[in-house]
Image: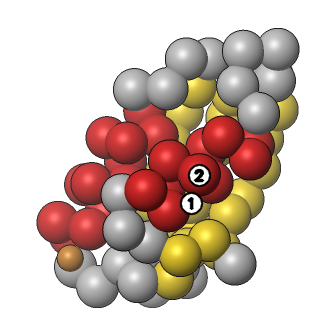
Amino acid sequence: MMRKVLQVEGMTCQHCVQTVNETVAKMAGVQKVDVNLEQKEVTIEFDESQTKLEEVSAQIVEAGFEVC
Ligand SMILES: [Cu+2]
């Protein structure tokens, strides 16, 4: 299991937090998602044999946010 922290820009409220959470949580191999709005951090625990970090980033971008 891999644990990574992404810096995500563009999240302004709890609705954004929920969107990012749901977007990432539904991906294959993702075990845990934690979104910290103040720190603009998204902590993800995932199985790297099922999902690549770049794919997670791409999904977050597709949802309308920016991954730094
Ligand atoms: Cu929002």
Residue at (43, 56) in percent of width and height: 62
Q: Quadrant of residue 49?
A: top right
Residue at (27, 54) in percent of width and height: 19
Of the two numbered discs 2 and 1 on the same chain, state the one appearing first in sequence. 1
Residue 7: mark in rendering:
none
Determine whether, in the image, residue 33 is placed left or right of residue 54. Answer: left
The secondary structure type at the circle numbered 1 is strand
How far, Cα to Cα, is label 2 from label 1?
Answer: 14 Å
As shown in the figure, which amino acid type bears the numbered disc 2? Answer: Ala
Graded by Cα atoms within 10 Å as few (under 14), some (14 to 19) or many (20 or more), the crowding at tag 2 reads some
* Residue sitting nearer the eye, 39 or 22: 22
Which of the two marks, 2 or 1, is nearer to us in this view? 2
Graded by Cα atoms within 10 Å as few (under 14), some (14 to 19) or many (20 or more), the crowding at tag 1 reads many
As shown in the figure, which amino acid type bears the numbered disc 1? Answer: Val
Tell me the quarter of the image containing the N terminus: top right
**Residue 23 rendering spot, x and y as whole percentages:** 37, 42
The secondary structure type at the circle numbered 2 is helix
Tell me the quarter of the image containing the C terminus: bottom right
Task: Read off the residue under disc 1.
Answer: 42
Task: Read off the residue under disc 2.
Answer: 58
